[in-house]
Image (cartoon, helix red, strand yellow):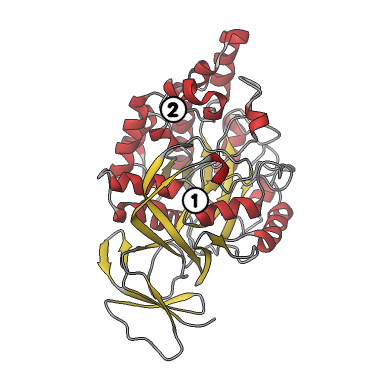
Amino acid sequence: MNSILIRGGEVVSSAGAARADIRVENGKILEVAPELPPRAGEEILDASGLKVMPGVIDPQCHFREPGNTHKEDLESGSRSAAAGGVTSFLDMPNTNPPATTAQAIRDKIALAGTKCHVDFGFFIGATPDNLEELNSIPEACGIKIFMGSSTGTLLVSERPDLDRIFGNGRKLIAVHAEDDAMIKANAARLGDKATLQDHPFIRSPEAALKASTLAVELSKKYNRRLHILHLTTEEEADFLRREKVDGLISVEVCPQHFLLIAPEVYEKLGTYGQMNPPLREARHGKALWQALKDGVIDCTATDHAPHTKEEKDRGYPLAPAGMPGVETLFPLMLDRVSQGLCTLPDLARWMSEGPARLYGMVGKGHLKPGYDADIVFVDMNKTRTFRNEEMQTKVKWTPYDGWTVKGVPVMTMVRGRFVFKDGKFNEPGWGEPIRFDPEWER
């Protein structure tokens, strides 16, 4: 691969932002300095006026392959990622069949290598019966546990099963923290009278807090790395402010949980606003944003989980829960910067450095010599209005249809190659498996 010199941009990290040049060679960052002289035959990229940021990492996606590729597949999902400045993603195991074996993970890795525009990793799903498989696959980024109601076989809600999984092995455990018994009891009380507006009360804050509390208890009991997915409640944020142990327990938040507020979101979007855990009232969103700013929450994610319009139009409770988000994640957060609510160094910490550190990703998350040249170029003066028909996801809708944001990723580079530039995409198959540090206790 030819050498590339990126000149004139403002390079951003969690430590700050400064004018600097970056030399890329063979897919790696070779040098970062205030001014680098060009070499003979070197490609020059003028980044004047742009913010040069580490590629965004989305640590929670559902790209639906295998089994539900009418909603999304690895090619369309990773194309959406590239359009949004996301250079690496971690995909969840609730596919059809579910990724609950070492062979299933290896099959997904092989398939992704032929289809993905960006780099990738995969979770293995826990069941009450696959403990041996969970600990047999170093290629998996972590173990996913659905503690609350789930489709298929991916539900682990009984204490003895949870103890057995937490108590055996070293790999990071990521939990969907909702208490299954409380959800079922709430649903039974409402019965056929339940409406979409009841969704956040069926899957109540109390159910979320109870499951998160149990997960933290098990993490501390077995000294097991825990990552709590898509936090949604003020109560959980307050609990974790007290009980979280740095280096042992980490937390993420999805932007929809502080941007889309109930009950208005259900009135406006109907079942297109239905997801699990649910969108909640304003007090929760305010608490989540503060917890992210304070460091109680470590990183952002999307829980990108698309369903077709036909499926969403079935009405409550028949419509499936979930919404797309990987393409809108970074622009929405850049818009928060434009509003003065956070800074670009904040985004580098939450969206790049944080996920790379939490999952032990090798060569990801930083614009430093020796790291992969995963770079996103941002025009903070540019605006974009999201339109359903313009989204890269197969389902062609977004809950942010009609929203205008200021701050737009205009080019995305993965390991020194542009995967998105001038509105065009590279050929699929450039993506590679993310490497995970074998010495990092996951």
Whether 233 is drawn above or below 184: the answer is below
Instruction: Please state if 248 lies on the left or on the right of 102 as rendered.
Output: left
Seen in the image, is 404 located left or right of residue 35?
right
On the rendered image, what quadrant is the N terminus found in? Answer: bottom right
In the rendered view, tell whether residue 179 sits above or below residue 187.
below
Question: In the image, residue 231 lies at what x, y percent?
Answer: 43, 35
Q: Can you tell which mark lies on residue 4?
A: none
Residue type at numbered disc 1: Asp
Disc 1 residue crowd, few under 14, some 14–19, many 20+, Cα 10 Å: many
In the image shown, does 29 or 273 lie closer to the viewer? 273
Residue 186: quarter of image: top right
- In the rendered image, which residue does mark 1 sit on? 58
Q: Is residue 375 left or right of residue 186?
A: left
The amino acid on which the numbered mark 2 sits, given as a three-letter code, is Leu
Q: Secondary structure at mark 2?
A: helix
Nearer to the camera, 219 or 308? 308
**Residue that numbered label 2 is attached to:** 209
Q: Residue at x 26, y 63 (%)?
A: 17
